[in-house]
Amino acid sequence: MNEKLKTADSHFAFGENWASYAHLIDQSRLAKAREGLVRLLGEDGLRDKTVLDIGCGSGLHAVAAQALGARRVLGVDIDRSSVATSRQVFARMGTEAQCSAQECSVFELENAGLGQFDVVYSWGVLHHTGAMHEALEKAAGMTAPGGTFVFALYRKTKLCWLWKVEKRWYAKASPTAQRMMQRLYIGMMRLAYWLLGRDFKAHLRSYKEQRGMDFEHDVHDWLGGYPYESISPAEVAALMGKLGFDPVRSFTRPGGWAVFGSGCDEFVFRRS
Ligand SMILES: C[S@@+](CC[C@H](N)C(=O)[O-])C[C@H]1O[C@@H](n2cnc3c(N)ncnc32)[C@H](O)[C@@H]1O
């Protein structure tokens, strides 16, 4: 593994995208983020719990965890812009007393003196760290005995190799080239919807149902999210078993060709 890939300098500018997205956060997106957490953890899965959100991005899901009764939520992110945005979102949503954010890579967590947490949450993050297996191990290690580790990772598809090449290019491309790529991608998607007789506008209208996210920001994140790795549910199960975790639930889909890119499979494990 190339150690340089683990540094923020070699990463896509995730934080800039989250800073732009954060202006859209309102009560309705927060409600969708809460639904996303309830789906994974149940209505009371966060009540009175300490929560570590690794790769907190915009901070939205840390706020949602607090709204579901978490006692204390710490968001960490390697990108200082994500950390600044999360702090602004905590202040705007009035959750500063329970939610905090700090700049820290998943690879530095064990030496950061943070202790362990009842719930470790890391949605769509560990495949972007440059060393996914090691990152999974480090994140798992932050879970207290009997605690819950929740994460989402890109599923393995037949075209992951192609997207890896595209993302490496896009992450370093000029803003003009990135905009052109976005237009091409969205145009192709529109065409595919039309050919399949599906309603693209309805897809856009319902997009925020997906954890409170936004289509255009997600397109930028998808096209540029580098480093990039992916994993199959069987590989996840084997790795987590070795780390001493038992499966609780998962939401997975077949990989296949996934022409417009992979999606995230979601996993919930308990530390035995
Ligand atoms: C696709 S975003 C996901 C954000 C958020 N978890 C969500 O679900 O909306 C990935 C985030 O992981 C962060 N990240 C990437 N590598 C990291 C690392 N080594 N340690 C901590 N965070 C990292 C990025 O800066 C980015 O904010």
Image (spheres, rainbow, N blue to C red):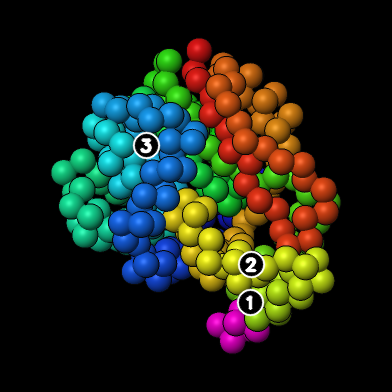
Q: Residue at x 34, y 69 (%)?
A: 23
- SS class of the residue under badge 3? strand
User: Where is residue 111 drawn, in percent x and y?
Assistant: 38, 34
Earlier residue among tags 2 and 1:
1
Query: In the image, what residue occupies the spot 83% across and 54% down?
Result: 257
Which kind of residue does numbered mark 3 sit on? Leu
Q: Which residue is mark 3?
A: 52
**Pointer 2 or 3: first along the chain:** 3
Residue beneath disc 2: 223
272 and 92: which is toward the camera: 92
Distance (Cα) linking label 2 and label 3: 27 Å
Q: Is residue 94 left or right of residue 225?
A: left
102 up-or-down from 205: above or below: above
The answer to whether residue 144 shows anywhere in this view is: yes
Q: How many angstroms separate mark 2 from mark 1 (CA)?
A: 8 Å
Residue 9, how many percent across, how many down? 51, 63
Q: Which residue is mark 1?
A: 182
Secondary structure category for the residue under label 1: helix
Crowding near the residue tagged with mark 3, few <14, some 14–19, many ≥20 C-alpha atoms within 10 Å: many
Instruction: Tell me residue 261's x, y (percent).
Output: 71, 58
On the picture, is 24 further left or further right than 139?
Answer: left
The three-letter amino acid code for the residue at tag 1 is Gln
Q: Magenta stretch?
A: 175-180
Q: Which SS does the magenta portion mostly show? A: helix
Q: Residue at x 70, y 78 (%)?
A: 187
Dot 2 and dot 1 residues touching (CB under 8 Å):
yes
Q: Is residue 149 above or below residue 154?
A: above
